[in-house]
Amino acid sequence: MPDLTVIPATNAALPDAPVALQHWIGGVWLDSADGATSERRSPAHGVAVSVAAKGGRPEAEAAIAAARAAFDAGAWSRSSGKDRATLLLRVADLIDRDRAAIARHEVLESGKPITQAMAEIEGAADLWRYAAALARTMHGDSHNSLGPDMLGLVLKEPIGVVSLICPWNFPFLIVSQKLPFALAAGCTAVVKPSELTPGTTVMLGHLLEESGLPAGVCNIVLGYGDPVGAVLSTDPRVDMVSFTGSTGVGKRIAAAASATLKKVSLELGGKNPQVVFPDADLDQAADAIAFGVYFNAGECCNSGSRIIVHADVADALVAKVAALSRRVPFGDPLDPRTQVGAIISSEHLAKIDGYVRGAVAAGAHVALGGAALEVGGLGGQFYQPTIVTGVTPDMAIAREEVFGPVLSVLTFRTFDEAIALANSAAYGLSAGVWSRDVSTCLDFARKVQAGTVWTNTWMDGFAELPFGGFKESGQGRELGRYGLEEFLEVKTVQMRIGQTRGTWVA
């Protein structure tokens, strides 16, 4: 094993028994009708963390019915922006109150570091507050220049019942990128968290209940994509599906939802390039590259896992990133010193390793890492910080989402070659450029096919700025005012306010 920084198991207390998780349907906490459950064990510690009700078609249909009834009743969908905002702010305060407990449970279910989890929960509370501001400021338009007797109104109304299908890598943060914006718009919702990390979504449900959210406005169904996600994507009572996850599953959801022409918002995979020009500050770039590829163990759609560096500075940059990689603390996610925790499952770890082995077989070179990581007292569901050089665009590791702490390095000579490499993947979620020349940065930003472009930084995020991808990274946007408008329909009202209209029939 290379000389790495590894944090062994701490003496932090672990759960004596798993917590029981139920569905929340129509304001009532329920087990599955058939009694089925699903156990989740900590990927880092091996202990049972939760035993969740395992839902099926009956639970999904009941949740949709509750959301439909709540929307049609109008208590929420026709409430004032002020009233919605007041409740969303109350939820944000409750999240702040319970952030330590929420973060700890997320660590146990996902394997991510405790300091990162705390920051994510705090960021989620900020999203609820931002959505509250949008609830009070959204508006339509009026047109009084249509003639002396005409007034035109453009109304923005909630789209209706929305299915929110969330992933395992950022369970609390991503549901908070969707749900408060849907609620701010006046929608009702059915939320399906990943079967791997359901606990913090259930904790959010309890906070929503405590906040006074009317019954049926938000419902939570636990279970697997088949059958729960399938029902949420096809039931005609659902008006919109918002999904975050893999591109393959996103395509299936879009196809299923097309049968009833539902609106579909998809935040999917990425193979995000960071392009480093020879005039870049290599120390700054190296630190951001290490952050971009190792954050959340690389299990992040925005992972900056594909480095495209000018050949003249490639060796120097790789050496700097390798040196930093050896200093990044991997290990026990309950230790505050840890920056990179466990891989979500043994199956996923094997998939990550398969990409690395495949690259080597295709002629690439492992400059650092390239194997599972043993952490004292915790076992081997960790992966070493890995840098793969000599990568060519045709290799799977250069084209496909690895979703692990693995950096692929490609080189270029000209600006046009760099753009061609950056745009060569099927994805278009995000991209970065490193250069001291503002013209180079702006030219790159205009020509790269990506929904977000960072210049001389990586993965900064703000509630005010929209997030989403080009190409096979999805459609639609989250965050910002665009994130609210995803959940709105536009209605035109034309009013004659003077004399009655002229006759048509003589």
Image (spheres, rainbow, N blue to C red):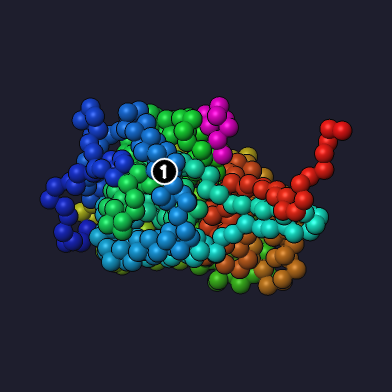
Residue occupying image coordinates x 37% and y 47%: 218
The answer to whether residue 342 is above or below residue 99 is: above
Quick check: is 283 in the magenta stretch? no
- The residue lying toward the viewer, choosing from 205 and 256, is 205
Which is the main secondary structure of the residues drawn in magenta?
Answer: helix
Tell me which segment is drawn in magenta: 254-263
Locate residue 256 relative to residue 100 in the image: left or right.
right
The residue lying furthest to the left in this view is: 16
Residue occupying image coordinates x 31% and y 50%: 205
Q: Is residue 223 visible?
A: yes
Quick check: is 255 in the magenta stretch? yes
The answer to whether residue 420 is above or below residue 439 is: above
- The residue lying toward the viewer, choosing from 290 and 61, is 61
Give SS at disc 1.
helix
Residue occupying image coordinates x 62% and y 48%: 490
**What is the three-letter code of the residue carrying label 1?**
Ala
Where, quadrant-wise, is the N terminus in this rendering?
bottom left
- The residue lying toward the viewer, choosing from 24 and 290, is 24
Q: Is residue 266 visible?
A: no
**What is the tally of numbered marks visible in this picture?**
1
Residue occupying image coordinates x 72% and y 71%: 437
Percent coordinates x, y for residue 317 in the rendering: 57, 64
Q: Which residue is mark 1?
A: 73
The residue lying furthest to the right in this view is: 506
For residue 309, what is the image quadrant?
Answer: bottom right
Where, quadrant-wise, is the C terminus in this rendering?
top right
Callout 1 environment at 10 Å: few (<14), some (14 to 19), or many (20+)?
few
Locate residue 408 relative to residue 491 in the image: left or right.
left
Locate residue 393 relative to residue 350 in the image: left or right.
right
Percent coordinates x, y for residue 377 in the rendering: 20, 54
The answer to whether residue 195 is above or below residue 112 is: above
